[in-house]
Amino acid sequence: MPDITAPELAELLGVTRRHATDLLSDGAIQGRRLPSGAWLVDSDSALRFQASARTGKGRQLTPDSAWALLWELSGMRAEWLTPRTSARTRERIRTLSADQIARAVASRTRAHHFRAANVAKASSDLISTGRAAAGALGVDLMDDTRNVSGYVRRGTASDHAADNFMVAARDGRDLLWDNTLPIDYGDTVMPVAVIAADLAVSTDTRERSGGLRALDDLRRRWLDSH
């Protein structure tokens, strides 16, 4: 998706132009300043900021709670939560829509954009998510492994990129996600609700629509069984 201007960012977020510029200057949203003083804004970063800032209930979830909600939707138990926090997590599933869930959990991680010289090598030892694992959702999306899309198992995205000949690029289609899980996860693919949530904040319209449909299906199934 092409870069946008600072005024377009302000309109997207519903804030003043000055506040939009402050977000760019502080690094909250990625962009680059031109010699003229104008900003070019990474549209993907802007949309992810929008998703994480507007949860629909006015509150963002902590990473531990966000992961737990996605674990619960995937039919798995979040062992790291106390019974009281688990009860709050289940109540959120009952009251939040699929779109609100996607927004509420978006801030638990961040996707970093790269260009990979060797996609197969760069994808090794990652936990697949998003488009690379979309076929698991049953919403007319297939796994697309032409680009990297996965969570690092250890260390940082930059470490993995350096070891696998990946170059940072704002418009890169190869994505590495920060692993903020409170547990070690040994599988090669993220649980279905995680895949859906990551697609639901994509800048690609088809991916976003599929992710939201999958989250809605998972929520409805969860409600039917609870």
Image: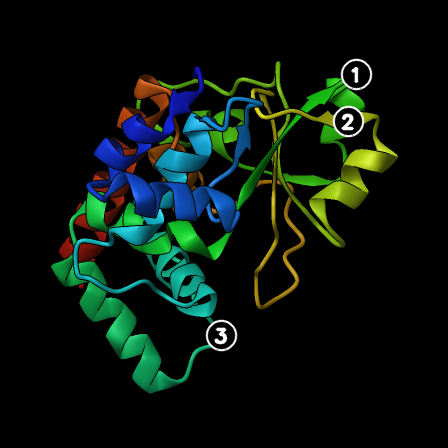
SS for tag 2? strand
Q: What amino acid does circle 2 point to?
A: Met
Quadrant containing the C terminus is bottom left
1 or 2: tag closer to the N-terminus:
1
Q: Is residue 86 left or right of residue 221?
A: right
Comparing 193 with 164, the one in front is 164
Which quadrant of the view contains residue 160?
top right
Q: Is residue 31 above or below residue 225?
A: above
Percent position of residue 170, x then y: 58, 26
SS for tag 1? loop
Q: What amino acid does circle 3 point to?
A: Glu
Q: Is residue 71 left or right of residue 124?
A: left
Percent position of residue 181, x then y: 57, 61
Few, some or many residues within 10 Å of mark 2 (<14, 14–19, 20+)? many
Q: What amino acid does circle 1 point to?
A: Ala
The residue lying at 34 percent from left, 42 percent from top is 20
3 or 2: tag closer to the N-terminus:
3
Report if the CB atoms under discs 1 and 2 are less than 8 Å apart. yes
Which dot marks residue 166?
2
Q: Mark 1 — residue?
A: 117
1 or 3: tag closer to the N-terminus:
3
Q: Nearer the viewer, mark 1 or mark 3?
A: 1
Q: Can residue 38 be seen at all in this image of the molecule?
A: yes
Which dot marks residue 79?
3
The residue lying at 61 percent from left, 53 percent from top is 179
Q: Nearer the viewer, mark 3 or mark 2?
A: 2
